[in-house]
Amino acid sequence: MTVRIVLVDDHRMFRSGVRTELANEDSIEVLGEAGDVVEAVDLVHTQRPDVVLLDVHLPGGTVRPGGREVLQRCADLLAAEPPVRFLALSVSDAAEDVIAVIRAGARGYVTKSILGPELAAAIRRVADGDAVFSPRLAGFVLDAFGAGAGEVASVDDELDRLSQREREVMRLIARGYAYKEAARELFISVKTVETHVSAVLRKLQLSNRHELTRWAADRRLL
Amino acid sequence: MLGGVCAGLAKHLDSSVKEIRILMLIGGALGGFGVIVYVWLWALAPVAGGAPASGAAVAGGGLPAGGGMPAGGGMPAGSGAPVGGFPPSVPAQVRGVGPGREVPTAGTAPNSGLPAGAATVAGATVGSVAEPTVDSMAGGKVRRRPLSTDLMIGAALLLGGLYLLTLRLGWLVRPDVVLPLVVVAVGAVVAYTQLDEVERTRWAERAGVGGTRMAALRVVGGAGLVVVGILLLVVGATGDVAQMGRTLVAALSVLGGAGMVLAPWGIRLWRDLDTERAERVREAERADIAAHLHDSALQTLALIQRRSADPAEVSRLARAQERDLRGWLYGGPTAEATTVATAVPCIAADVEDLHGAVVEVVTVGDRPIDERTGALLAALREAVTNAARHGGGSVQVYVECGPSGVEAFVRDRGPGFDPDAVPSDRLGVRESIVARMERHGGTARVVSVPGDGTEVRLTVPDESGRAGAGRPG
């Protein structure tokens, strides 16, 4: 199955670079490109791609960062059937940028230093409905949920803490393990790793843990 | 004496308390000179600092501890009334020393002719202040009293002392002139100190923090005092109250009219000042940014153009510049690293500069650097260097400071090697990583799969033997 994607980034050089790198991937088709918030919202609505590769910082619009506004104005498509899924891509791995787009609905976050094949894998993963975490995002999650300090959820679906297994998976991702390697390390299947990561993403989006809400309130994201 | 002034002075001058006290008493007997010195010292000398634990030291050196006492010691008023007025308001610990020492002094003082009124006023003012101060000292907390209060009381007492002095020297002092002047002065001081505070709290106010009604009240009160003082002066001079009223109305109308005319202009001026200030701040910021970009990005770009033939060097330069800009924009590693989480990015940066690799750092939690974590960081540096040198490409560093200790992982995507096949004369991994960690009660493991990269895992337990995890050293 071919994954149809749209590139949203304000740097034309970067867009063409990504296009070139993805040209080798047969299973990924680039439908179009957009350079600012308004263009992006229009393009996504007309093309209805499977995945939007979304830059966090975009010109235009009123909300900062611009990527968050695109997500907000495409909220109808996030829940549509089939849904449009967003993978955030940015040079900045500052926590506020990451969390702003994740909590607005992005399914994953990678930095722009990612190499072509890894980017293609991340796009396919998001297209399948799974989550993509960069090592730094995993580290942020461990910090924000108190997992580094040893807090562990007693029930799996507790929103404000990670379960033991989720913590292990996050730690491996923070250590630079790919999902496949993490699965091997924990003696579980890749699918199970993906399930854990998706569960963590859901917690990150929905949790009211004070580290996250205080952070969001400080930036008027609530 | 009771204010602790003598004790403090003695400490400062390295002489005995007794000597200072005697000198003070002599000074006090000689026309009130000692009084003035004492009062000024008491008002201006800093409260003794010292750790909260050293309560005794504080009690000994804390000057205002017996705030009320200088009046008693200094005022050789001889009349029992002001001195007797203190004890109820002075906590026991001070009182225990107080009267026993001071009452005889008062009795022997030669100035029995001094008016008791001034002393009483001064004493009452100070006495009322004394209690909370002493209480806070007794509570083991050292607190700096607001300077303005100190100054106020000091000034009041000084005036009292001066008044006594003039009386003793036989100068003619006319209360009907002096009193209004004092009122004017007090009013002005109150208003001005408040204005200063208003200026300071303006930012807080803009940020939405509570108002400064009290400050405004005090400014108005101060201004009122000034007006009353002037009125008293004028009435004292002319003695005509009716004419005074008319003059007052005329003066107020003139002031009001002038205010109406000048207010818009004043507001305009104020706004202009405001915009100008904002403009200047913006300008300074822009200059800062320009300077930073010039020193960093432009320089690096120039270097890159000159070295374009050397790809490794170009990529090293670009990476170093990226790190620098990132740190500047998002607050990256700082100059002095005193904790694990700040030290790790510095290590990564050093290795990147030396070996041209890309080192990604993720840290969770933090703790200060001590002997153990220092050893871990040294081993980590070695491991990152190895990974950058042999691994090729990017290195992923993950450091987690948890309740049970610190764990560090260094992963590279290089060709990998068989750790057991490394010849024993190669000391790198064995000595500087494994042995170092074991010496400090930690562990080091090297996991390497040929073709699948290498991971070095370092751990140090939290300082064992100590109960309670995560206690900073």
Image (tube, rainbow, N blue to C red):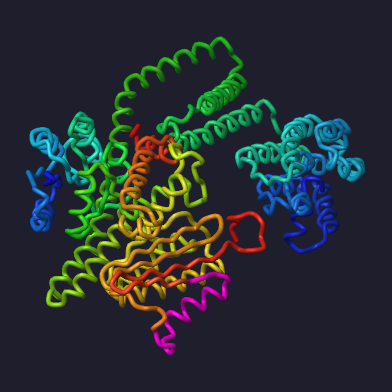
User: Relative to residue B192, is residue B36 drawn left or right?
Assistant: right
Residue B390: quadrant of the picture: bottom left
Q: Is residue B434 magenta?
A: yes
| Position above or below: A220 against A88 | above
Q: Measured along the vertical axis of the image, is residue B64 above or below residue B374?
A: above
Q: Residue furthest top?
A: B242
Confirm whether the magenta stretch covers residue A106: no
Q: Which residue is drawn at 45% across and 35% down?
A: B204
- Which of B257/A196 is in front? A196
Residue placed most toward the observer, A2 or B435: A2
Residue drawn at 28 percent across, 71 percent down: B357
Left or right: A99 as drawn, with respect to A66: right
Q: Position of residue A145 (x, y in %)?
A: 45, 44
Looking at the image, residue B452 lies above or below residue A136: below
* Rendered location of residue A198, percent (x, y): 33, 43
Total number of numbered labels?
0
Which quadrant of the view contains residue B71?
Answer: top right
Q: What stretch is highlighted in magenta?
A: B422-444
Q: In which quarter of the image is residue B266?
A: top left
**Closer-to-camera residue (B428/A178):** A178
State which quarter of the image contains the C terminus of chain A: top left
